[in-house]
Amino acid sequence: MAAHLCVVPSNSLPPLNTSIPSLAIAIICVVLTASSPLPVDMGFGSPLPPGEPLILAGNFGELRSNHFHGGLDLKTKGVVGMPLHAVADGYVSRLKVSTYDYGTTLYIDHPNGYTSVYAHLLSFNDDIERFVRSIQKEKESWEIEVYLGKNEINVKKGDVVAISGNSGASRAPHLHFELRETKNQVPVDPLMLGIPVHDEIAPRMYKLLVYPIGDESMARVVYSNGKSISKVSAPAEVVVVGKDNRYRLNYVKEIQGQNKIAFGLEANDFHNGSYNRLGVAIIEVLVNGKTFFSQDIDRVPFTKTRYLNAMIDYEALKQKGKYYYRALLLPGNKLGVYSSAVNNGILQLAPDSIYHVEIHVADRTGNQSVLQFDVRGQDGYHFSESKLGAAGVASIPHDRHSTYETPYIVLDFPKDCFYEPFELQYENTGTSSKGYSDVHLVHHSNTPIHKFYGVAIRTQNIAPKYEGKAVICRSGISEGGVFEDGWMRTRARYFGRFYVDIDTISPMISLYNVYNGKNMARYKSIQVKIGDNLSGIHHYRAYMDGVFVPMQHDYKTGLITWYFDENLGSGEHVLEIVVKDKVGNEARKTVKFNK
């Protein structure tokens, strides 16, 4: 399943014979000629109860914010509480309870070399739940992570191991299910390993993008009515329409280009029984009958998943909120999903030449869709529009360490922080309204950042007693930081508006379903809401009658919840909540209730 990049010189793709009649159109398609290997049955069963169909809310490799989706999101009828089953014999190798990301998560190692992962859980089965509760009380923390060895907790295929939920970063009840290679924890598409999902629906395409690449390049759309649109700094966009999995450009006579161009595509996959838009697994581009570009998102290591931002049109995502696949390899793109990339996906056009290209997109079960259109090489375009953009304060490389420094700010960019070189935009707009530093406008949000980079800002007017309360803010969001010799220092992974602020306000604690003297006999749980105004919550503790209890934190609502257990007797009880933020401000609240 591993992909190896093949880079072919662009001169290996000559244009077609230009004696073709002028009405002929160069066809560009994305066609699937090298399909994904057929699924291998590894003996895995369904994680859902017997008879429940596997309906996808999300598939493997789907484009998400800063990452590829690493598994299958399986629908649980829109509710929490569905029993979940071990997909094969094995042993519980890891248990994790977290406020963020996967939430409550179970990992099972199997003898066949794979690990199954069950995430966003409400809880584990009764035996595992008791084990986890004991560790939480021992550590006095809701959040825990435990690694287990063989034979500590063994399971059989079909055993109920957990209950579905909506914990962590989940936005609606479902099961996030993964299969990983146990030896390296690399996620693999479960549909390649025999997980049964009924799918007879081919991927759908919505828009083609043609990018002019470099200086003296142009992309033009010539419409059927004779009108045309030419682009030199932005992609030319064309709506595509289709029937029976065959697509064409809508009301377009032909695509023209000068010098160098590349292609992008808006597309989604679907499957039977679900309305959700899914990611496209396989895209392949052919030019003049030869493979030009191909990708197959079949496995993505966690160390490479952020390279999604190099695959997509990141600027379009930020400006339009849409994901476009680009058949183009940026210099700093180290994804391993490409099996072929002629000239890194850049097509060199010869004047008055026609290039036939085929594009197919396909899913794991072999359903395919085809787009066909024409591209003709041109010359003589007069470039009146500058392609260089505004001059920057510094040229930032992608493949080596670099810094930008003024008397008031230092930016430290490590090697491989970016996917391609760019001109850094920067402006100091003067002292902030709080007066603790200048305000620094660092570049813009259209440039993706792969690694954390260093930010140091010279401070002003911060009294010694508040030095430990200072943070660096980016567009109103705390990025934390450490005060040192009159400077605040932190790391960031986005550009924006940077300045220094101080946080002297304690976290907020408000009673949600309880108040002093309330009779809670008919309630199953007690809930309290917590939050912080700037630096963020560092940790919280809850004590029932002086004994720690693990209250689950849902950061999406701010609620912490404790479900009453059999050890809580009748009578009066005292709940104490302690919350501390990331700069040490602390809040406490006590409530007495009856049970």
Image (tube, rainbow, N blue to C red):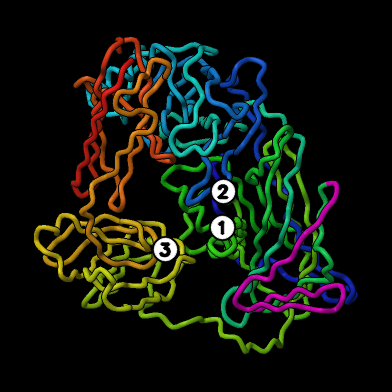
Q: Residue at x 77, y 75 (%)?
A: 353
| The C terminus, quarter of image | top left
Residue 67: give x, y in percent of width and height: 49, 48
Amino acid under disc 3: Phe
Q: Which residues are magenta?
A: 218-244
Amino acid under disc 2: Leu
First of labels 2, 1 by sequence position: 2
How busy is the neighbourhood of tag 3: few (under 14 within 10 Å), some, or many (20 plus)? Answer: many
Q: Residue furthest left?
A: 464
- Disc 2 and disc 1: Cα gap in Å? 9 Å
- Disc 1 and disc 3: Cα gap in Å? 14 Å
Q: Is residue 307 above or below residue 23?
A: above
First of labels 2, 3 by sequence position: 2
Q: Residue at x 57, y 81 (%)?
A: 215
Q: Residue at x 76, y 44 (%)?
A: 368
Rendering quarter of residue 406: bottom left
Residue position marked by numbered label 3 in the rendering: 418
Q: Nearer the viewer, mark 2 or mark 3?
A: 2
Residue position marked by numbered label 2 in the rendering: 63
Q: Is residue 423 left or right of residue 323?
A: left
| The N terminus, quarter of image | top right
Rendering quarter of residue 320: bottom right
